[in-house]
Amino acid sequence: MNLVTLSAFDLSLAACLVLLLSVLSLRMQLGLSRQIIIAALRTTVQLMLIGFVLKALFEHVHLGWMSLMAMVMLLIAGYEVRARQKHRFTGWWGFGLGSTAMFISSFTVTLLALTVIVEVDPWYTPQYAIPLLGMMLGNTMTGIAVGLDRLTQSAWQQRTIIEARLMLGQSWSHAIGSIRRDSIRSGMIPMINAMAAAGVVSLPGMMTGQILAGAPPLEAVKYQILIMFLISAGTGLGTIAALGFGSYRLFDERQRLRIDRLSSG
């Protein structure tokens, strides 16, 4: 592959563009100048750290290290899902709900891809397992976070409507059914839009990276199609699972709405 390496000076030029954006934000009083700088610093530090971690993993392929890395990624993703919600579930559910749904969907789809589709040997080879799992968790995390936020906010705002439906004899599943469906749609729409626009409006990140690294365009396209399908399935399944568990958690064994299981924001 004809890979063009980047120097520290090249990255500094790109960083100047971010600094320019921060200055413009300050001049326009957008209140985003500090957030832009912090986000840029976090990106740099986090990506440099993961670069060193991946280098070590590539040199020492071991299932134990891969499992540890996967669990760390899952726990961080679970925390991010919880942090993005205004009315989050109280107690362990606030963290465990999103984490469990991501574990069921992302890990299952990634394992299927590694063992059946890509057929890499061993299946936990970091060069394949880490990027696939990272893309799966990142997109599934967003879908679940958006869906749960929509579910909990709607349940909080429409609690009187839900309770009225329960009083009319509807089951808890029917009483919250329309809210659950709208929340699932909210979580899945970004991924559907990404698939619909791929190749026409935008070139997805993985495909762009492979082409820049010198991979044949058609081979990069095939991998990108695979990734888009896997991400869509993982995001959809994870969102459906999280919203199903979340809806169930909003009611007790007597089918009463338990809005007290949500924080007040």
Image: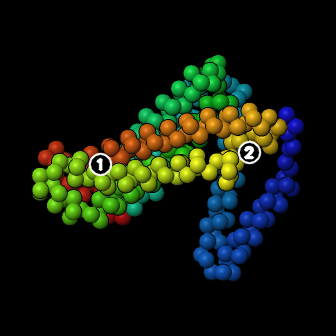
Q: Nearer the viewer, mark 1 or mark 2?
A: 2
Position of residue 192 measured from the top left corner of the image (x, y, whole percent): 53, 48
User: Which quadrant: the N terminus?
Assistant: top right
Q: Residue at x 53, y 48 (%)?
A: 191
Report the amino acid beneath label 1: Ser
Seen from the viewer's position, the closer of residues 235 and 72 is 235
Residue contact between numbered discs 1 and 2, judged by CB atoms under 8 Å: no
Position of residue 172 measured from the top left corner of the image (x, y, whole percent): 20, 49
Report the amino acid beneath label 2: Thr
Position of residue 97 measured from the top left corner of the image (x, y, whole percent): 37, 44
**Residue that label 1 marks:** 247
Is residue 223 visible from the viewing direction of this image? yes
Q: Residues within 10 Å of mark 1 (few under 14, many from 20)?
A: many
* Lower sequence index among marks 1 and 2: 2
Tell me the element at label 1: helix
Seen from the viewer's position, the closer of residues 249 and 230 is 230
Q: Is residue 231 above or below residue 42?
A: above
Q: Residue at x 61, y 67 (%)?
A: 35
Position of residue 229 measured from the top left corner of the image (x, y, whole percent): 56, 37
Is residue 62 visible from the viewing direction of this image? no
Seen from the viewer's position, the closer of residues 251 and 37 is 251
Q: Residue at x 55, y 36 (%)?
A: 230
**Residue that label 2 marks:** 208
Q: Is residue 92 above or below residue 12?
A: above
